[in-house]
């Protein structure tokens, strides 16, 4: 008999939104902040942005909050931070992303987003490190997400729940980002299941389908954020050219190094975007 407590979101009879509401109450109690305005999930290469957004007034291990799982990936810090921005707004920074490939189910993947919405956040910024299909994107290039293709064969929506995704990634927020950095390109993000990297043939499939960025996160989270009524900004850090586009083999070490190298520039950009919201 296992001594590991069952995870509340693994019970299909449990309402995932009730767990998110409970998590939001715990965050309010642990941080001393009643509500947040903006939420950010910081993927590979983006973590330093949390230090530039404003004053961190509370930082807690995500595992102290119901529904959050311990991060499985090196490079993810596993904390929740409440930050007071210079304009007086509150940002909740999520450093505890559960990836679909971990096999915990979609409810756990999108729990952080649903919790952010339950804390009061109306804007969700989703970032990631990803492979680029456009060959002029060099490692370290930040790219806006204009749309996505979900190849997980799954959805965070349950039952007869129909949500319009026509303008999922906010054109208003993308325009705002380009006002701050006119060089920003944009593209369609393709979420694969992972954890293996895509084959060259799969990358060509994604390209033929209209994709420009390949990765293993974000799309499912964005759908959940839209269901929760949030406005979404998606940004990818191109950490490598995708398989078959790059002449070199892919490695997780390369992804982490590219993120580390680009971190000062992209973190400063993201902090400026948050300040302009």
Image (cartoon, rainbow, N blue to C red):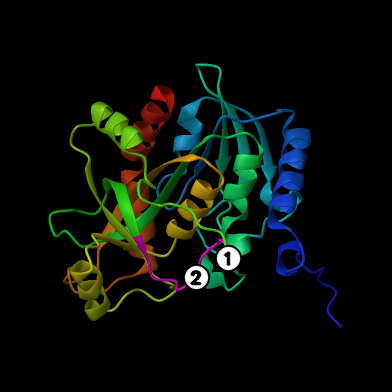
Q: Label 2: how many residues lie within 10 Å, few (<14), some (14-19) or many (20+)?
A: few
Q: Is residue 237 above or below residue 100?
A: above
Quadrant of the rendering where the N terminus is positioned: bottom right
Q: Label 1: how many residues lie within 10 Å, few (<14), some (14-19) or many (20+)?
A: many
Q: Is residue 158 above or below residue 199?
A: above
Q: Using the rendered view, name the quadrant where residue 84 is placed.
A: top right
Q: CA distance from mark 1 to mark 2?
A: 8 Å
Please report the bounds of the magenta region as a residue range: 149-158
Q: Residue at x 60, y 41 (%)?
A: 117
Give the foreground label among 1 and 2: 2
Q: Is residue 99 above or below residue 265?
A: below
Closer-to-camera residue (177/132)? 177
Q: Residue at x 60, y 64 (%)?
A: 158
Quadrant of the rendering where the C terminus is positioned: top left
Q: Which residue is mark 2?
A: 154
- Tell me the element at label 1: helix
Q: Which residue is mark 1?
A: 106
- Left or right side of 89 for 135: left
Q: Position of residue 36 (x, y in %)?
A: 61, 31
Q: Residue furthest left?
A: 136
Q: Residue at x 42, y 23 (%)?
A: 275
Q: Position of residue 162 (x, y in %)?
A: 51, 57
Please report contact status of discs 1 and 2: CB closer than 8 Å, yes or no.
Answer: yes
Closer-to-camera residue (256/166)? 166
């Amino acid at each position: 008999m296992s001594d590991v407590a069952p995870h509340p979101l693994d019970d299909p009879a449990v309402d995932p939104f009730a767990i998110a509401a409970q998590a939001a109450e715990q965050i309010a109690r642990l941080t001393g902040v009643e509500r947040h305005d903006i939420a950010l999930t910081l993927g590979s290469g983006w973590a330093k942005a949390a230090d530039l957004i404003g004053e961190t007034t509370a930082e807690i291990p995500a595992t102290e909050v119901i529904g959050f799982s311990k991060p499985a990936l090196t490079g993810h810090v596993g904390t929740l931070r409440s930050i007071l921005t210079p304009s007086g707004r509150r940002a909740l920074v999520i450093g505890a992303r559960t990836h679909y490939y971990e096999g915990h189910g979609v409810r756990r993947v999108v729990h952080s987003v649903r919790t952010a919405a339950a804390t009061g956040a109306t804007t969700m910024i989703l970032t990631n490190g990803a492979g680029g299909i456009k060959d002029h994107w060099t490692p370290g290039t930040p790219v806006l997400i204009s749309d996505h293709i979900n190849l997980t064969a799954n959805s965070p929506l349950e039952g007869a729940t129909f949500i319009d995704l026509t303008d999922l990634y906010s054109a208003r927020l993308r325009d705002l980002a380009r006002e701050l950095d006119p060089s920003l390109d944009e593209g369609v993000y393709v979420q694969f299941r992972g954890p293996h990297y895509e084959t060259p043939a799969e990358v060509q499939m994604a390209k033929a389908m209209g994709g420009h960025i390949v990765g293993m996160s974000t799309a499912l989270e964005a759908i959940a954020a839209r269901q929760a009524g949030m406005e979404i900004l998606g940004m990818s850090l191109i950490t490598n050219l995708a398989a078959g586009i790059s002449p070199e083999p892919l490695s997780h070490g390369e992804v982490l190094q590219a993120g580390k190298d680009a971190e000062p520039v992209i973190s400063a950009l993201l902090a400026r975007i948050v300040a302009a919201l």
